[in-house]
Image (cartoon, coloured by chain):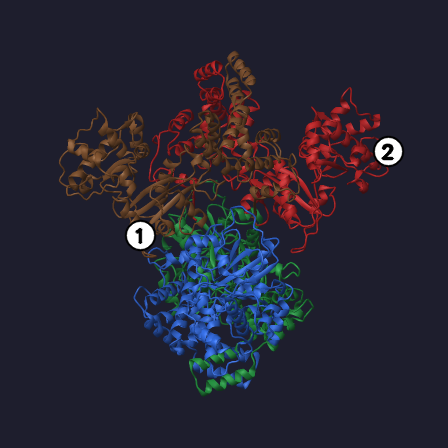
Chain colours: A brown, B red, C green, D blue
Amino acid sequence: MRRDTLREIIASLSSAGTSVFRFGAGRRRLSLEALCRQLLDLRGEASVTVVADRLLAAYAELDDDGRARFFATLRDGFGPDLAAVDAAIARYRAAPSPESVQALQQAAESPRQEIFRLLNTAPGGTAALIAMRADLMRLGADAPALAPVERDLGHLLRSWFNRGFLTLERIDWQTPALILEKLIAYESVHEIQGWDDLRRRLADDRRCYAFFHPALPDEPLIFVEVALVQGLAASIQEVLDAPPPAPGAAVAADTAIFYPINTCQPGLHGITFGDFLIKQVADSLARDVPGLGRFSTLSPLPGFRRWLLAELSAPASEIALAPAERERLLREPDDWLPDAPDAQTYAALLLHLGAVYLLRAKRGSEPLDAVARFHLRNGARLERINWLGDRSARGLRESFGLLVNYVYDSRTVAHNHEAYVNAGHIACSAAVRGLLTKRPQRRAGARARPGAER
Amino acid sequence: MRRDTLREIIASLSSAGTSVFRFGAGRRRLSLEALCRQLLDLRGEASVTVVADRLLAAYAELDDDGRARFFATLRDGFGPDLAAVDAAIARYRAAPSPESVQALQQAAESPRQEIFRLLNTAPGGTAALIAMRADLMRLGADAPALAPVERDLGHLLRSWFNRGFLTLERIDWQTPALILEKLIAYESVHEIQGWDDLRRRLADDRRCYAFFHPALPDEPLIFVEVALVQGLAASIQEVLDAPPPAPGAAVAADTAIFYPINTCQPGLHGITFGDFLIKQVADSLARDVPGLGRFSTLSPLPGFRRWLLAELSAPASEIALAPAERERLLREPDDWLPDAPDAQTYAALLLHLGAVYLLRAKRGSEPLDAVARFHLRNGARLERINWLGDRSARGLRESFGLLVNYVYDSRTVAHNHEAYVNAGHIACSAAVRGLLTKRPQRRAGARARPGAER
Amino acid sequence: MRRDTLREIIASLSSAGTSVFRFGAGRRRLSLEALCRQLLDLRGEASVTVVADRLLAAYAELDDDGRARFFATLRDGFGPDLAAVDAAIARYRAAPSPESVQALQQAAESPRQEIFRLLNTAPGGTAALIAMRADLMRLGADAPALAPVERDLGHLLRSWFNRGFLTLERIDWQTPALILEKLIAYESVHEIQGWDDLRRRLADDRRCYAFFHPALPDEPLIFVEVALVQGLAASIQEVLDAPPPAPGAAVAADTAIFYPINTCQPGLHGITFGDFLIKQVADSLARDVPGLGRFSTLSPLPGFRRWLLAELSAPASEIALAPAERERLLREPDDWLPDAPDAQTYAALLLHLGAVYLLRAKRGSEPLDAVARFHLRNGARLERINWLGDRSARGLRESFGLLVNYVYDSRTVAHNHEAYVNAGHIACSAAVRGLLTKRPQRRAGARARPGAER
Amino acid sequence: MRRDTLREIIASLSSAGTSVFRFGAGRRRLSLEALCRQLLDLRGEASVTVVADRLLAAYAELDDDGRARFFATLRDGFGPDLAAVDAAIARYRAAPSPESVQALQQAAESPRQEIFRLLNTAPGGTAALIAMRADLMRLGADAPALAPVERDLGHLLRSWFNRGFLTLERIDWQTPALILEKLIAYESVHEIQGWDDLRRRLADDRRCYAFFHPALPDEPLIFVEVALVQGLAASIQEVLDAPPPAPGAAVAADTAIFYPINTCQPGLHGITFGDFLIKQVADSLARDVPGLGRFSTLSPLPGFRRWLLAELSAPASEIALAPAERERLLREPDDWLPDAPDAQTYAALLLHLGAVYLLRAKRGSEPLDAVARFHLRNGARLERINWLGDRSARGLRESFGLLVNYVYDSRTVAHNHEAYVNAGHIACSAAVRGLLTKRPQRRAGARARPGAER
């Protein structure tokens, strides 16, 4: 079946002369506001596409000031008709009913929502709207009055990027370079060092999956990298630096390590796909790789050091440390190297503090750590804290090199999720819980006691 | 790139035991209402998919009474929180602002909208929601109180079936049988008489195009059939019964005849794609078939006879007929055969009445005839009325066999559209306009005066 | 990746004016013989494509006489240079060596082989050559002198249609209609009665697989239809007339019945794919349909009645029948209906004779029956002869309604194959072997004794 | 349509236990010779695939000595039956006829050809045979006795890689990385400096096309890179180092420069696709890029310096140089830098010598230069010699930095080709021909006289 995408055809429509039919209001230059009005007027017509295309082209040429003015126009000039809102309120007050409250809701809907819907008909419209929302969020940081516009657009994007419309695709060395280079650009947790590194991350003992939306076939929305390994990996460098298997060699793995999840579209911020991604990928892997019995992350504690230093300086901290320990932690440089003669003692201290951070430091009833919130809410178990799990400059700077395994266990994930959501209960291995008790440790790390892991 | 659609994976998720992770609230049977509440509770979780699947399965087993009860539950139990609405009204009244009116709009949004969005995550969710809206419209004919539910669902579908997400695809003999059999099922204007007839309609001198949505790859939403012919075709039977060209023979055509547009999804009623379809297809054809210079429809006047008989019986009709003419028209049987000795006189009479119907009979400021409204609004010109253009039983019964050519002329389509929308002006050939004057005709039909055609 | 097939581009090349480069020897009309010489002259040039295209077009316009003349030209005018052959013989005689025998072989190769290779570069060349070989075989029936030409072309096609280049594809309701209609045309064993019948044969409890060659993507080379059933099916009408399963209903089958294998390209006669097809399909099914434990055919005995009538008329037949039995079999009409009061006795007689035919009637050391030779050579076991397994007119006319199950048993297929090929041993169930003994039977058919089946 | 390639299925067949049917002669280890015999015995059987797979696996483990021994076995043990050859000679002598010479040809065909055909049925068989021929050519350099084996395999590959089976595909940034990395590996004329360089070569003002064979979908056979530029490019560094156009910027080009053609498969050496490639690509470009009016190469003279130095040292050279010139050319270092104060004089000298090389230095009746032979035979015109067209180390070392434009002109390409093939006439611009006359030049290079170019 031949396929002329709408977009290809519209591309020809919108350049005068190549289309059979010439649309719309001539070629004269209109203000963005006038184009918005024209869009709403044309609503049901085919020519809406051409006007939408023209509006997006004009928007693309604006600088930040111009964009902020355009957003202010959308906010002030394309809000609901307040007289109609008042009338709908009156009718609702007179007779509250499903009909009258719905009528009120419709009266209160902003015409700018319709403008966004119409802009989507332009070639590249969806991508342009996502970029527009990214602009709104960036500019909105300094101009909170733009928030209603951002919320309207976000509402629409959330509806369109409904998970029912997404496809999960495996990314490998057969994937077009156009998409692969985006992985290199978007991977922000453990940066991809060029094409050779990427190729290694897509070798036979690795997996990469991404969600795509049909309107953006070349743009991954979110992706996860997975390493297939023997045993529960404890160090990200071990994973990243492991040599690839020989071509054609069988991959004998019992554990899938999800090592980073990256979102790719700032304009889709707040529209979550990640919870879904991990479980779907686990399912896909379980069917693909016989012998795979364990699914775990290797996750950062991005706020650990910041929290710790704040605690150490706080007048009333719960953390009880010897003054020397306290001094040392405060003094430790960013690129701190854990080669001191007392490394083991120091490791024990940091593992203890890591456990305190994950289990005791709270934001409301949930852990302070965003990554922990994400996985625990998903039903994972806090399995192990790894001493020097991340030796990168960033890992040392942000979390003294600690890294965490969250395990997704099919037998307990539903129960963990319920207990966490309903009662704030954190599923946690005995080993990690044991770290809460500060005491002399004979050996470095929970890792050394495999018996306690499961 | 391998592609595991979300839907395939979810299909495995939702059958217990095949998934790595078992989700949600056990296996016990819940009421539809309880499942709706569970959906809203789980909102952000992966398990929402499984609950959505379960709800849709339960819905599928309901009879019409059960479905009506479910819709009533959605209306009464999943409307907005009225206390919150009242509070939002109060805040809005106190300080009308973009923020407060948006907050009001959000407070007035029904949670059932969110339920629909969550149902879409189930495998086959989009198709199930379209079917649900078809149910709502069917049952709503007798139960107008269901209208708010139907409107909420319709609002969502209109947003999802935004034209920016649709693809235009050519349908030919290379198309999967699965899709082709749907054309046979959905063609309601000029029924397709089985596979041989379909094959002829997809031969080298024919074209068929349809809009598809990515979530429904096997379901055409709307399609149009086109015949590539020499000269402006005047009879649908001539088009349908013309022998196919020899394989490989060149197609020398100067005119594209759009002979029916069919919509396929009752559940998408009111979400219009047709205006867009004709112009895109014309564009695609112009690039594909060199030498093509004219784009015309061959369209029915579905309400002509009904209108005429009503006029004849009305006390104060504008139509002035001789009593014998009047009597005869009223008496004419459904399967009326135009073989009378005075056929030419009769033809002249009916062509005159057809012109009156199309140009004078109004609904508001627009023509009474829905097909005329559609094409005139699109910028087409009423070019010719064809005597015995449709000799089928239906054609005779509904419109005394008349058929109309609406011509899409690239030089005038924009102007016609504007004049129609702004001033109600109908673009019309001199030949058709001439038919308004009732007078003796020497020969049958506008068709006989080719000089007047252009 | 965009793909311009060679063929599309050549299509434009060969129509003067649309190509950037105009090739070859002008536009004047040349004889086929002259075109052949031109082909050989141009050999390494791009323009060979255009000449090949012209030659094939000229060939297509010839009637049978013209084609026969063209083949005679290929035989007489494009054979090897005999002087060169004689010289190569002399060199070989003087010094037999790998080099000199290879040089002899090359000297004896006909230039017409190279002509065929060059014709393949035309658009549609491969299909045209297959059609040409079909012509050669058809015309060769009356003109055996064309055999060397046919063998040269056959040699080339056998090389090109090497099994390593074929793909096995499943055909279902998602397959393009263009391919499906070919199944209807090519199925000659159990004719497909139009699209409804085809659809039933592609339902969830059926399978259809075909081999394709990359140069003929729309042309199945050979296909097999499979029914997934419970138990060993005994009647083709039961299989063909069984209602399809409800949509979405699970298919619980323990047996795959291969009911016909059809070849599609007469021009590829003698190039065998069938042995490979059954085993590959069985493998594909075993992975696809859990629970499938038995693979069997339901096969005709196409020569049974012909053989039997010849035996009955032969002076010295091994078949000992009572005169009344003999008379009756000779008298039985083509559309014989097995409803006589002595049906059971008669059934026993025919089952006995069927067993004799399959196990005793020989062509050389192999069974006379071509279908039996095919499956036994493949390693299948002659499992059961079914009384009234095929009640169709053809089944009754050709084999008194008998039908055979050949079972492919993974544990014995290799052993059966070896024993058959090396010692002429026929793998056979005890039940069938028992039928060789002619005796009064209590119940009709081997089918009635399931205990003996395995 | 789902597609199980033969190869996937065979992959499962050949690993014992995963297949429904176990094939062939058990699992014991056989010699390569025994496997060859088994292949020929099994010929028509499905199990041939498994034996072929086993033979290729055993071959892959051999070192060069082992491979040479295997090839000797194929030569000595799998040649034709000489008694049968003698008998066929006798029959042919007795009665020369199309039949008897064909029978002789068949008797003289080596069984090793059939072995190669059967090996092709293994998964990856085609690629393995191409690699085997590469081995044969490599080892054959020292062991000419292997030539008959190499010729048999080459004969087969030439038949299989018939141009009618190849597809021309555009390669761009949407192409899978798996294929792109092969471009980097195979480009040997102007090496690709990693992924960034590759990306630039695939930007909007560049094109890359390759031929593929269906059995090797991930392996380009030959590819050509094209630059779309304004005017006839004179320097490869200008082309390679030009900045890419801004994304979305229109490409306004009047000239397509084919800057290298690279073959990718050493095992297909001698099977030519290149002549075809240029013309097809030109045709594809002409349809794609309106405004493109000139097609030219930018080609090396790889043997220029070697030839020149040999001439200078030869006792009887036609080249008449002043002793100082001669001395200097002989002394010039490999990495010679053309920055001398007399650069212009020197340039004139080298351009003169380049013209002599291209137009006068012969191998038989054709130019000594292989690149010149290729393009002139294709009908191109020797348009311009460019002083310092290639400043790379290799360009300086091999050809003193000269580079040539061969122009493909649609109006003359057929005539040029005929004149070259029939009369050895070289199509050549007046400018280049003028360089034959050695004389003082005012300005450097033919390039400086644009008027003479066309």
* Residues behind callouts 1 and 2 on a single chain: no
Asked if marks 1 and 2 touch (Cβ < 8 Å), the reply is: no
* Relative vertical location of residue A288 with respect to residue D264 in this rendering, above or below: above
* Residue B209 seen in the figure: yes
Disc 1 residue type (three-letter)? Val
- Residue found at the very far top of the displayed protein: A94
Q: Residue at x 35, y 32 (%)?
A: B24
For residue B440, which numbered disc appears in the image? 2
* Residue C6 seen in the figure: no
- Residue found at the very far front of the displayed protein: D341
For label 2, the SS is loop
Disc 2 residue type (three-letter)? Pro
The answer to which quarter of the image holds residue D38 is bottom left
Q: Nearer the viewer, residue B156 or C24?
A: C24
Residue A348 lies left or right of residue D368; in this view the side is left
Question: Residue C162, position in %: x, y?
Answer: 47, 64
For label 1, the SS is loop
Q: Nearer the viewer, residue D290 or C216?
A: D290
For residue C425, which numbered disc appears in the image? none
* Relative vertical location of residue C187 with respect to residue B13 in this rendering, above or below: below
Viewport quadrant of the C terminus of chain B: top right
Mark 2 neighbour class, 10 Å CA radius: few under 14, some 14 to 19, many 20 or more? few
- Which chain letter goes with mark 1? A
Residue D367 lies left or right of residue B388; in this view the side is left
Question: Residue D348, position in %: x, y?
Answer: 54, 69
Question: Residue B448, position in %: x, y?
Answer: 81, 41
For residue A251, which numbered disc appears in the image? 1
- Which chain letter goes with mark 2? B
Question: Residue A222, position in %: x, y?
Answer: 40, 40
* Relative vertical location of residue A139 with respect to residue C123 in this rendering, above or below: above
Q: Nearer the viewer, residue A160 or A283?
A: A160
